[in-house]
Amino acid sequence: MSVRIIGTGSYLPKKVADNNFLSTIVDTDDEWIRQRTGIKERHLSNGKEGTTYMAAHAAEAALENAGIGADELDLIIVATVSADTYVPSTSCSVQGAIGAIRATCFDINAACSGFLFALHTAHAYICAGIYKNVLLVGVEVLSKLIDWKDRSTCVLFGDGAGAAVVTAADHGREGFVQWSDGAGGEVLTCPGRAVGNPWKENASETGYIQMSGQEVFRFAVKKVPECIRQVTEKTGTKLETIDWFVLHQANSRIIQSVAKRLGVPEEKFPMNMEQYGNTSAASIPILLDEMNKKGMLQPGQKIILSGFGAGLTWGAAQLEW
Ligand code: UT7
């Protein structure tokens, strides 16, 4: 038993904030942000585009692309750190919104690795013969968790949702590795605010995302190549035969460094953080959807997805398209 992604979808909020706009609210500039991160602009929720709203739109797009109905779904897993509510879970709210009446639902929090961890979970359920059709959504409204006075973080993140429909397949080579290191978790934290309009609410500053950027950078460029090698060893695949490396879109310099460390041409590492910033759990499925819509993904291609983030968490998945 194997799994296959048969549909993808995404939703990006309408409002776009470019680097020049951010330079009017903190002491930064377009050149610094672009050179250090590769980010030019990001989409931000208008306050009404909440986590469930964006997730449900991305889910519907993925179902349409897959050509199956919501009532054919057996399981919905939503990966997010920025749910509208603690309860109900975002996955239950999405189920209600799209009418996936047969599906069971739960959320996972593995920060920027969330979509990967959700995919691995779906794989386990499908290969155990428990479920057949699984909807995965990575979604974040990070703008409500950001201190808009902190230039070291507010220029990095964006809002958005990406979704994929995964189903049982009878052939295909795939593998997964996933890791966590709670002892290293203090380098990227968010004590938490669950609700609010990022542009209007006056919340306590202790609730915001805090990050030791350089330490996260060092962690990423070490662990991502390591786990990509681990997953290819697991599947017995030569690195040079991989068609695409779809990485978490945090920073173009991280991706360039990973490509160099692996000795793989950068052209195999598509990037879109220029337009969307770092959308955490949503970044990999948004990029996958973009590649799918552009016709970059062809049947039989070997694809590696890899992410890293708070927790600490990191991992890689190898799939056949
Ligand atoms: O999804 C996973 C989560 N996060 C990440 O993947 C982030 C990983 N880390 C990074 O991407 C990079 O470390 C950053 C982009 C966050 C920062 O880049 P850096 O090259 O590591 O810069 P830095 O933190 O060493 O800061 C260099 C300088 C500092 O000034 P001084 O001390 O040299 O005078 C900062 O105060 O840049 C300053 N700085 C800024 N300047 C203009 C920090 N933020 C900004 C800013 N605009 N927005």
Image (tube, rainbow, N blue to C red):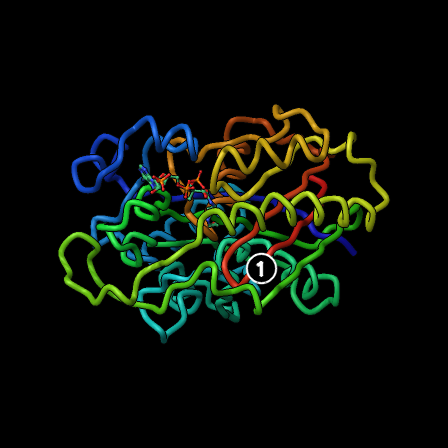
Image coordinates of residue 13 in percent, x first then y, are: 29, 43
Query: Does 145 sit above or below residue 300?
Result: below
- Classify residue 90 as left or right of residue 14: right
Crowd class of label 1 (few under 14; some 14 to 19; many from 20; radius 10 Å): many
- Classify residue 57 as left or right of residue 116: left
Q: How many marks?
A: 1
**Image quadrant in which you'd find residue 228:** top right
Give the quadrant of the N terminus: bottom right
- Of residue 266 and residue 102, the one placed in the foreground of this image is 266
- Of residue 108 and residue 40, the one placed in the foreground of this image is 40
- Residue pictured at 62% horizontal, 31% vertical: 297
Image coordinates of residue 168 in percent, x first then y, are: 70, 55
Q: Which residue is farthest bottom? A: 87
- Residue pictured at 45% horizontal, 59% vertical: 188
- Of residue 223 and residue 129, the one placed in the foreground of this image is 223
Q: Is mark 1 within 8 Å of ligand 1?
A: no
* Residue type pointed to by label 1: Thr
- Classify residue 171 as left or right of residue 53: right
Residue 126 in view of the camera = yes
Callout 1 secondary element: strand
**Quadrant position of ligand 1:** top left
Give the quadrant of the C terminus: top right
Image coordinates of residue 10 in percent, x first then y, are: 43, 43
Image coordinates of residue 225 in percent, x first then y, are: 68, 43
- Classify residue 251 as left or right of residue 154: right
Q: Which residue is farthest right? A: 236
Residue matched to label 1: 313
Residue 64 in view of the camera = no
- Residue pictured at 52% horizontal, 71% vertical: 104
